[in-house]
Image: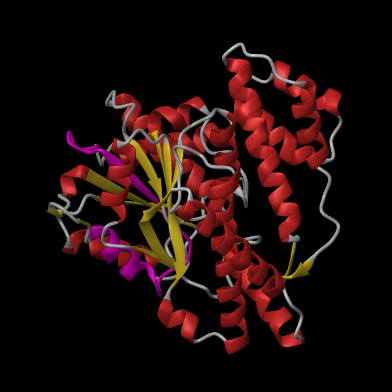
Amino acid sequence: MDTQAQTQWQVDRELVLHPQGRDCRLTVTLPVRDEAERLQDTLAALANQHGAEYGQIGHDAYEVIVLLNNCRDASAQIARRFARTHPDFRLHVLEFDLPPAFSHAGGARKLLMDAAARRFQQTRHPEGIIASTDADTQVSSTWLSGMFLEFSKGADAVSGDIRPLEAELASLPAETQAYLTARREYQELRTELAAVLDPDSFDPWPRHYHHHGASLAVTAQAYAAVGGLPLSETGEDEALFRALRAHDATFRHSPLVEVATSPRASGRASGGFAELVQRWSDMAARGEPIQVGPVADEIVRLNAHRRLREIWQRQQLGLSVRAGQVEAVASAYGVSVRWLQYQLATASTFGRVSLALEDRALPRAQQVPIQHAIQELRQRLDTLRAYQLHYA
């Protein structure tokens, strides 16, 4: 038995002692590595879930599986004490010294999500929902009700908005706070621009731009269809998002689903949010602005992606596509017409064409300060909103 199979077997063996309830619709997976400072608040938020229309969500509707991964602090004691003092809350606490292949956030998350998928498979509930969050994160009181609503509308996967914990944000230097605020505004404006110029019927505006493990959920059926969460030390959530896109899964960036996470500058995982905060802190100390791509380039790519979507839809209906339409898209992304025609002819889903095009596109050499981009995005969106209002 290889390391992965043996580790998965150990997790499943422990979970035999914690059977899934008959009415369980959703399993929350929570990897933990030395988070004694924040874990109590994380668990309390998960236990206190409400629905805007029907009051508190019963604990029979969901379960939480905590995987304590090579912890050396009091995290295990905190989790077990919470389970004892909240007997109606279906909290299952597992503790392992994981082997190197899994002793990181990505590995622990994969073990948990794979185990949750097998639980729904065993109970014959392919519509069961596998949710993910982090131990330094507090979900909103309507986190689950927002998810349940989006999945009831046909979503295969849902991600939630992620904001920094206010108390910890206030402790950061003012310059770092300004960088975080500017980045969020830039991403929100960019996301609205994409929703206007390249609309996705299943993921309309308002929406957010996050699809990270701190606030992510997927049906067991969709999770199995894409082969589960890739095993990676970092970026496993982005890899799952790409896999779902490649399968044309319906993905909702829901504004109804929210969490607040720690904006600390020192974290457990390389390549995570903490590393990004540290980089911005260093840049702020040097007075170095965040650089982003020009808005004009973004508009060209968004319009081209909308045309690509239209070309794909015409092909699926057996309608003809003019050569000039393909040429325009190829030119916008800096790829050859022949290469794009081949992708359109051979790809099994639109998502595969879209991802291949993004990966092959020429990089944008020019960069501009983020504040310049924010100003231009505001102006462009004001014009687009006025146009939409006039022709509504």
Task: Name the residue at 56% across, 81% down.
Answer: 177
One can see residue 10 in this view: no
Query: What's the magenta region?
Result: 20-47
Residue 75, given in percent of the width and then of the height, sits at: 39, 66
In the image: residue 242, left or right of residue 202: right
* Colouring: secondary structure
In this view, 143 is above or below 242: below
Which residue is drawn at the image coordinates 51% and 59% (left, top)?
386
- Residue 292, image quadrant: bottom right
* Residue 289, image x, y percentages: 74, 77
Question: Which one is in front, 127 or 315?
Answer: 315
Residue at point 28%, 59% (across, down): 46
Q: Is residue 194 magenta?
A: no
- Between 166 and 76, which is closer to the camera in this rendering? 166
Percent x, y of residue 31: 44, 54
Q: Quadrant of residue 330?
A: top right
